[in-house]
Amino acid sequence: MKFFDEKKEEVHASKKSRRLFNLVLKGCIILLLSLSIYWKIGSTDHPADLWQAFLQALQTSQWMYFCLVFLLMPINWMLEAFKWWQFIPGRMGFWPVFKATLSGVTVALFTPNRIGDYGGRVLLVQAKDNWATFIATMAGNYCQLVILISGGVIGLSYFGQQYLTEDWQTLRNLIPLAIVFLIGLWSLPLTFKYLNHYLKKLERFAWLRPFVRNLRGLEEVSKRALLKSFAFAAARYSVYSLQYFFILQFYGVEVALWDALAGISTIFFIQASVPLPPVSALLARGQIAMLIWTPFGANSIAILAATFTLFIINLVIPAFFGMIYIIKTNTIKSLGYENHAN
């Protein structure tokens, strides 16, 4: 009897420690997310002026543009979910993939270069799908990067010569480097079957085996699935560009559609070329936007307000929903520790 009593106490203590760890992990995520948003809002210049600009814009006939930006937000993240879902066919339904996408936004918001996107998604999938989710996210981000740089080269080539004459000599040097990088990215799927031979040798290391096996599984992804992922990446790029254009119209920044799209792709390209820590990212985006839109006579408050509003709609609101999903999830079970303990 004493043996069974001790066993029960051990199991009880183990469950208690897992519940405590679960609560601490969720508490840390909530705290870090709140601090990140607070710091980013606090780092914004003239917040009262930005709020006033928003209220004034709502009172004009341009308020419909704000509604369009808001309505496109869930489409933006649904396309992101569809994009990486192509690399894990049959493993899970779309709804779990979509919730995992939003939880990735939550963790990415307070981590350098949005690296937390990987860990955030893992928190909302079953433990057996952790590595598959990680690899699928990598593959989806690869597709998005190819589209982003491709659009950036085209946009910068036009926009830089037309409107950034003073900075063009510096920015034009990025184009040849970007083209070489693009050639390498587009060629990567063609060389994967050759890399697979070397990846197989890494399976001798037990701690690398789950990662390598899932990575090698990408070779089994059909060309059709890869093309669909590229298509979803391009669609998401288009949706986000339209959101940016609409928010500029909302704040009265008068710029033609083609010039706006070229300028927006230039902003994306510059942002991708300069890694940004999470606290300074919003400020840096505002400074880049100032560089791009000043030639059109836009005032600084309107430009910063557009950048800040897009940040709230596309990142803060989805991160809030992602946080709710994380709170409702047994993260210890998702990470595989609960089954391991049992």
Image (tube, grey):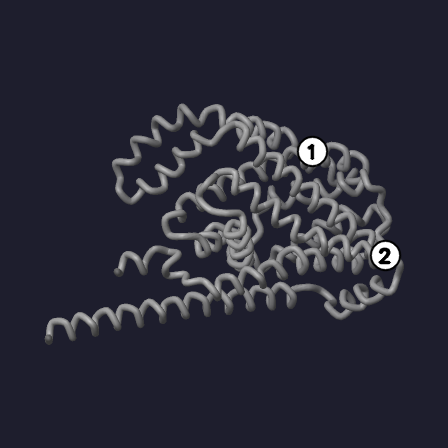
Residue in the image at 78% along x and 34% along y:
161
**Would you place residue 61 above or below residue 193 in this image?**
below
Instruction: Identify the mark nearer the N-term, 1 or 2.
Output: 2
**Numbered label tally:** 2
Amino acid carrying mark 2 in the image? Gln
Q: Is residue 4 left or right of residue 177?
A: left
The reply to whether discs 1 and 2 touch (Cβ–Cβ < 8 Å) is no
Mark 1, residue position: 172
Mark 2, residue position: 62
What distance separates the C-alpha of mark 1 from that of mark 2?
A: 35 Å
Amino acid carrying mark 1 in the image? Arg
298 and 171: which one is in front?
Answer: 298
Q: Residue furthest right?
A: 61
**Would you place residue 3 above or below residue 219 in this image?**
below
Q: Within the image, what quadrant is residue 105 found in?
A: bottom right
Q: Is residue 328 left or right of residue 262?
A: left
Q: Can you say which quadrant of the picture contains the N terminus?
A: bottom left
